[in-house]
Amino acid sequence: MYSSSRSGNEYQYNNDFHQNPLPHIAFEHLIKSGTSLPSILMLMVGIDGLPITKNPPSQLWPNLGYFSNISDSSVFIISSYYGKPKPEDSYKYLSDFVNEICVLINDGVMYNNIHVKLHLKALINYAPPKSFALNFKGHTGKKSCIRCHTIGSFWNNRIYFPQINAPLRTHDEFRLYSDSDFHCGKTILLDIPKFDVISSVPFDYMHCILIGVTKKLLMFWTGGIKQHNQNLPKN
Ligand SMILES: [Zn+2]
């Protein structure tokens, strides 16, 4: 593990890139468990930030991973960032990760005389870290859907997306950065081989469905938001 200070904030990357090219916690776990490895490890990565203190404000951003085609794969830390503001530049924030994963995808490593390569199967984020990592408009923007070209409307102090058949975005189109209303800048994630930034970045079930729609419906029905003639009775 090494750490560096970027803009006064602490950043840690989780392994010695030259001596132990897999994230070492995951690698140790795989060795100890005697797991037989497939020739291609499917890596799932989650990027998220969480507040640590309120006053003064500080945040921790762990990058977490697990292998989806190893039955007992544990979640491991790939890198972590601690700072007062959130990481400002996603290009710098993700550069160590992307540099390492490119080697693991292209060249792989030898393990018990087996040549193991990596494939980044999915990047799983909720909306703010997703737009940060891929450098496009945040989810309150009118052009902020990574899957399609829908344009949001503003009503009742919120953006909503009434269109259901907008033309779909594609990875090749994303590479061109041709939609200036959608892109904020370049993303280093496009450097990752065989990684489709549209189809391999799924919607996040917990925030979209559970915390998003389901929680709002429950609060609405029980009168938790505002009184409404369709609220359920209090008792
Ligand atoms: Zn869409």
Image (cartoon, grey):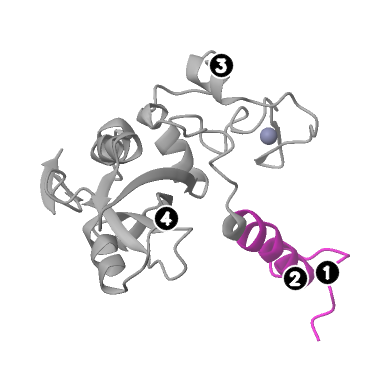
| SS category of the residue bearing label 2 | loop
Above/below status of 74 relative to 112:
below
| SS category of the residue bearing label 3 | loop
Say which amino acid is labelled 3: Asp
Determine whether, in the image, residue 34 is placed left or right of residue 66: left
Above/below status of 18 relative to 72:
above
Precedes in sequence: disc 3 or disc 1: 3
Q: Quadrant of the N terminus?
A: bottom left
Precedes in sequence: disc 2 or disc 4: 4
Precedes in sequence: disc 3 or disc 2: 3
Residue closer to the observer: 127 or 63: 63
Give the residue displayed 64% in from the left and 63% down from the top: 210
| SS category of the residue bearing label 1 | loop
Regarding residue 164, the answer to whether it shows in the image is: yes
Q: Quadrant of the C terminus?
A: bottom right
- Identify the residue under disc 3: 179
Residue 151 percent across, percent down from the top left:
69, 26
Residue 7 percent across, percent down from the top left:
15, 38
Say which amino acid is labelled 4: Pro
Residue closer to the observer: 140 or 211: 211
- Identify the residue under disc 2: 223
Residue closer to the observer: 197 or 28: 28
Distance of label 2 from label 1 (alpha carbons): 6 Å
Q: Is residue 214 magenta?
A: yes
Q: Residue furthest right?
A: 229
- Identify the residue under disc 1: 231
Residue closer to the observer: 221 or 135: 135
Regarding residue 54, the answer to whether it shows in the image is: no
Q: Pointer 4 and pointer 1: residues touching (CB < 8 Å)?
A: no
- Identify the residue under disc 4: 38
| Magenta span | 208-235
Residue 14 percent across, percent down from the top left:
20, 53
